[in-house]
Amino acid sequence: MAIVDLVMPKLGESIMEATILKWHKQPGDSVKMDETVLEIATDKVDSEVPSTAAGVIEEILYKVNDVVPIGSVIARIKTGAADTITSRPVYSPVKENDDNPPAEKAVVMETIRPASASQASSNGSSNRFYSPLVLNIAASEGISLSELENIPGTGNEGRVTKKDILQYVGERKSGSRQSTAGSHQSTIVRQHARQEETSSMNESTALTTYSGNVEIIEMDRMRKLIADHMVRSKHTSPHVTSFTEADVTNMVMWRDKVKKEFEKREGAKITFTPLFIEAIVRCIKKFPLINSSVDGDRIIIKKDINIGMATALPSGNLIVPVIKNADQLNLVGLTKRVNNLADNARNGRLNADDTQGGTFTMTNVGSFGSLMGTPIINQPQVAILAVGAIKKRPVVVETPHGDSIAIRHMMYLSLSYDHRIVDGSLGATFLTAVAHELENFNGEREF
């Protein structure tokens, strides 16, 4: 007999944790190789985790709704093999070395210990609960257990949340955090105050009544994740939004002229989205700083151009599948990729990798009739472009014989950008360049 560890699989470049939605197997159940053991969810997509061995489920280490770091052991499978099977190592971003002080090594050991997320961790003399994710962050940032105990928690019963420890790390790096020894007493006072405030808020929530005829709906998991992502983006980036408009008459007329032939020849319907993305890609090549992210005081300019396209789901939620290496696709390739991702998104068939690695995002607020919008940046990107509804309007046009009024297809565009690295001049220049590309669309082009 041998025991094989089933670990939380890596689901994407930036995904560090996943939530367990449902266990398909329980202890004592037999399982085949590659048979689904459980369903998990990230802030991007839902996935199934298959078994890595054939045998019997020996132990389940996490419960439904537990948030589990990537690489953690989530279950153990007893196999019938006589030979010893080497279990997969538990993922930890920390490389332990002899220079680590004993307290920090204890954190590393605690991080990789497969404990249930509902089990209280006893650290030192404290019976305070720390989730595996919090312990992992503490280990990677060199925060000892004694220092961790003094971090005020805003979670239930004073629990330290991911937000609490990241805020602590940020304050410590910026120098605004006092030394642990000097601030121990004030930390305890703040902790008790937050616990009392949390208790008061819970009591207030429990006593809240709503007058009139109302319906109370709990947010689903995806809506909660979207809400958290949007709030975090606003807290992270100082948003600025610039606006412009474009005369897209040439583009509209060309699409109307070729759409039937395009679908007949290529087997795909051509929408405006690939035409917008084509223009965006050209402008990103001219202004590469728009295609970047911020890491502390460093600017990371991305050489790959991966365009995210915000897609509405039937549930009303939003997801952003990514067109990888969009600059290497022609119009036909862009069209087929856009249609495929949109169809998979609406039918729940996206893979985890389909929503990873975006470097710039476009959202079509006009698809629901909006003339314009002020989109929120999709972190860790630094800009997002919104295109509004295309409307016929009388506008002044310049001709060789003078100005005249004509009916044109007009569209508003708006660009929200991170003012930490994108100033108004760059933001407005990039937006104007996109509008110029759309206005000068070649109505005689081939597809």
Image (tube, grey):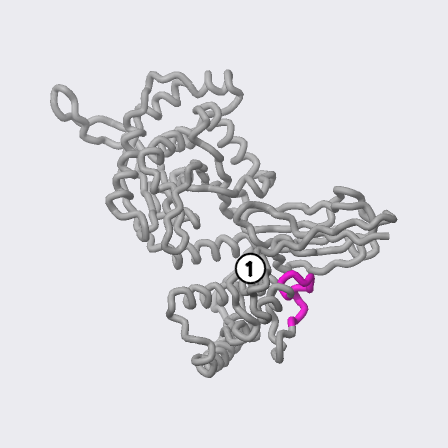
Q: Is 114 placed above or below 343 here?
A: below
Residue at x-position 49% and y-position 68%: 210
Residue at x-position 47% and y-position 23%: 332
Q: Nearer the viewer, residue 172 or 152?
A: 172
Q: For the magenta stretch, what is the residue range?
A: 110-121
Residue at x-position 42% and y-position 19%: 447
The residue at the far left in this view is 402
Q: Is 397 placed above or below 41 here?
A: above
Residue 204 in view in this figure: no
Does residue 31 belong to the magenta stretch?
no
Give the residue pinned by disc 1: 218
Q: Nearer the viewer, residue 263 or 62?
A: 62
Q: Is residue 159 left or right of residue 273?
A: right
Q: Is residue 211 left or right of residue 383?
A: right
Residue at x-position 38% and y-position 41%: 291
Number of numbered discs visible in the structure rendering: 1
Q: Is 326 placed above or below 232 here?
A: above
Please tell me in which quadrant of the rendered image residue 287 appears.
top left
